[in-house]
Image (cartoon, rainbow, N blue to C red):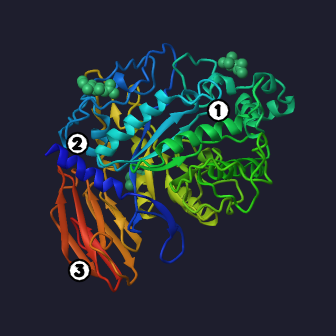
Amino acid sequence: MQAALHALLLMTCASAQWSVRPSLDSSRFVITDTHKREVLFRGVNLCAQQWWYKADDRPISPAAYNGSCPPNHPDTYMEPPICEVDAGKAPYEHSTEANSGNDLAQIRELGFDLVRLAISWSLLEETPGDISEEYLERIEQIVGWGAEQGLAFIIDMHADFYSHALNPGAGPAYKDGAPAWAVLNSTIDKFPKYKRTVLDKVGFDWHTVAAFETFYDDQKPEGDAMGLQEHYIRAFAAVVERFNDNPAVMGFEIMNEPAPSELRVLDFSTSKLYPFYRRAIQAVTGVRDGMETCGAGDAIRDDCAFPDLGINSKKVMIFEPMAVRNQLDFSIQLSKPFTEYSNIVYAPHTYTKSFTIFDPIGGYAQSLNTAWREATKMRAGVLVTEFGGPTSDDGFDRLGNITQQQDEMLTGSTFWVWKERGGGWSLWSGNEGEEGMHQVETRRKLLSRARPRAVVGQLVRLEFDPEEKTMLMEARAEEGERGAEAGACEIYVPVDVTTDRIEVDGAVVGEAEVEVRGDGSRIVRVAVANEGGVYRVALGRGFE
Ligand SMILES: *[C@@H]1O[C@H](CO)[C@@H](O)[C@H](O)[C@H]1NC(C)=O
Ligand SMILES: *[C@@H]1O[C@H](CO)[C@@H](O)[C@H](O)[C@H]1NC(C)=O
Ligand SMILES: *[C@@H]1O[C@H](CO)[C@@H](O)[C@H](O)[C@H]1NC(C)=O
């Protein structure tokens, strides 16, 4: 039974390969699966980058997580260790109780299908040029646990404000962002006075800006022949290479929340940020963008392509706007194509009313409205890789409005964050491993949503009511030859959505087929008629 289940799950995953293509009406770009169906993800952020300070006693070695879970130490770490103590048992036999030590099974049980796994450059390349095999194995272990639960992954090169080494309060356990050797203090110390003054005035840490400047300018650490940006791209490429054939990995996020290194922020995106993204994509895909390859030792230039590292990746490459977007809910950038690689996804973060410095004129809709416009000009899909907010009462209003907008604008997302010390912005309250640790019901209610996860044709409408637990979707398919799987629209119904009323309408063949999974969640399959047309599916409601 176990072996058969594993084989079945592996088969399902092995067929998964995502790409990006224009929607049927060419109005935007969408993520698609192997059967060219439009995919809508709902997921969560999981942190393997180690935030916080004091002691440094959390093991990296996968062996330390083999059937057990290291102690949490919430006084030291921002997030608890990622564990799956029941790994090896059949997927649905993992306990999903609070404190059961099975994060990935708990994530699946909540109704998510995507994990954005935050990793850190510090842990990846602790000494220059030396990629940590142990850390890659640890990442692989987590991805393997998730794959058993049917979860897809984005591996995210996470950093907040460049490097932990710039945080005066950071201790040895703080491994966020760039390694200490990539913080070029003597250059940072020369950062001009007038720029410091301007940044102090707007309340932005000038050390961070100065450090990012050394990064974008590819400055070399003392005695090193290779600059910082090249180091980073090669470290990123090592991750892509390791997971390029892993069917559970949907894509790679090149950098989290890149801060500007210029006072002229508009210029920054055009002259620094997007050229950096183009180079990272060139390195791992081999795409040349019509340029000659740069000479050895001179790889970070605007007039030649970064060397092809022979990985030939076809995975989805995910890129973020300059982080200032979080304060505005729109980007200060000239949006235009920057790469010839087509599997690209734009990843804004939506923290409306939590991070925005004034209420967006366009309300909660503004962030996604502008994101889709920006992305479409760059020929990219959109996935919100972070959203959320505090757990105050009006925090729930924000989350309710933000998730509603994601449905309305047919946008996939990963919630920030899975677990956090004391609860914080996470889905849980309390500390992992301590009495009282429990899921926050209001958050679960808003985040565990029924939705079409694979749509034949183009998704045009989605409504989910978190109170009534009802869903309505509408899509439009073109005429076309379809095999059994390629012709089915799949709706993912988490265990919290219990209605038995399932109605179909329009260009479909027969009734909906329902598969009940081991945790009580359901996959509803609707066969779309070969001649195409508009079709609709309703759960727990009618079509009015
Ligand atoms: C995990 O433990 C089992 C037995 O308890 C052992 O067979 C296996 O080799 C271990 N795996 C790792 C990666 O240490
Ligand atoms: C720069 O300063 C930070 C903070 O003191 C330190 O951790 C880091 O190692 C220094 N970088 C270099 C290259 O020495
Ligand atoms: C959106 O926010 C408003 C104001 O805070 C609130 O009244 C409303 O219930 C929220 N909507 C949702 C769907 O949560």
Is 182 on the left-hand or right-hand side of 539?
A: right
| Residue beneath the point at 52% across and 57% down | 314
The x and y percentages for residue 118 are 49, 37
Tell me which amino acid carries mark 1.
Tyr
| Residue beneath the point at 68% across and 23% down | 181
Q: Is tag 3's residue or tag 2's residue first in the polypeptide sequence?
A: 2
**Residue furthest top in the image:** 55
Tell me which amino acid carries mark 2.
Pro
| Residues under numbered marks 1 and 3 in contact, where contact means CB atoms less than 8 Å apart | no
Read off the residue under disc 3: 509
Is 446 on the left-hand or right-hand side of 341?
A: left
Tell me which amino acid carries mark 3.
Val
With respect to residue 351, does 531 lie above or below?
Answer: below
The x and y percentages for residue 543 are 27, 75
Instruction: Give the foreground label among 1 and 2.
Output: 2
Which corner quadrant holds the C terminus? bottom left
Read off the residue under disc 1: 162
Read off the residue under disc 2: 91
Ligand 1, by image quadrant, is: top left
The x and y percentages for residue 214 are 76, 34
CA separation in Å, label 3 and label 2: 32 Å
Is 192 on the left-hand or right-hand side of 138?
A: right
The local secondary structure at tag 3 comes to strand
Foreground of the two, 192 or 277 = 277
Foreground of the two, 347 or 19 = 19
